[in-house]
Image (cartoon, grey):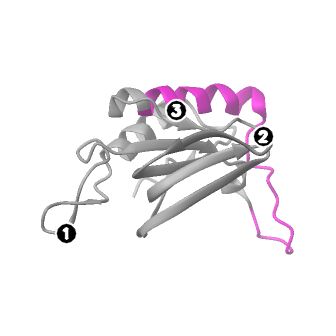
Amino acid sequence: MRILIQRVKNCSVTIDEEVRSSIGAGMLILVGIEDSDSLEDVEWLAGKAAKMRIFNDEAGVMNKSVTEVDGEVMIVSQFTLHASVKKGNRPSYIRAAKPEISVPLYEEFIKAVERETGKKAGTGLFGADMKVALVNDGPVTIWIDSKNRE
């Protein structure tokens, strides 16, 4: 399971020209799921995301988590996080899990992040053609893969 966290000033998800969800300052979490992922991956990544110290403290040092700054969270599924470009120029998405695996894990990830942060998260809609608008703050962008716990 992979997530890409972006610290944002604001973020919204639009589907069919209708805003589905929007947040103010906080983080956007893009989520990619593969067949071998489990609830253990969900829990580990949700904990990492909620506790990630990427927000400035009083001294201007990235030393606070999204919960410590009372920030909001947007969670969007993105199977392209598992793109392979090993051969040719057309990405392969063979590692991305099919909906019967990824939908339940995506939904569990949302619940886990909400438990960890104590707040309802904004979301996209799994499998939809979404337009994600954001103002990346910093920019701060963090990539985390549960199979490579560095």
Quadrant of the rendered image containing residue 8: bottom left
The part of the chain drawn in magenta is: 84-113
Badge 3 density bin: few <14, some 14–19, many ≥20, Cα 10 Å: many
Q: CA distance from mark 2 to mark 1?
A: 38 Å
Three-letter amino acid code at disc 3? Answer: Phe
Q: Is residue 3 visible?
A: no
**What amino acid type is highlighted by mark number 1?**
Gly
First in sequence: mark 2 vs mark 1: 1
Identity of the residue furthest to the front in this view: 18
Give left or right: position of 88 versus 18.
Answer: right
Q: Nearer the viewer, mark 2 or mark 3?
A: 2
Q: Residue furthest bottom?
A: 88
**Distance Cα–Cα, label 3 vs label 1:** 30 Å
Q: Residue at x 67, y 42 (%)?
A: 34
Determine which residue is flagged by label 3: 109
Looking at the rendered structure, which numbered label has been put on residue 120? none
* Residue that label 1 marks: 60
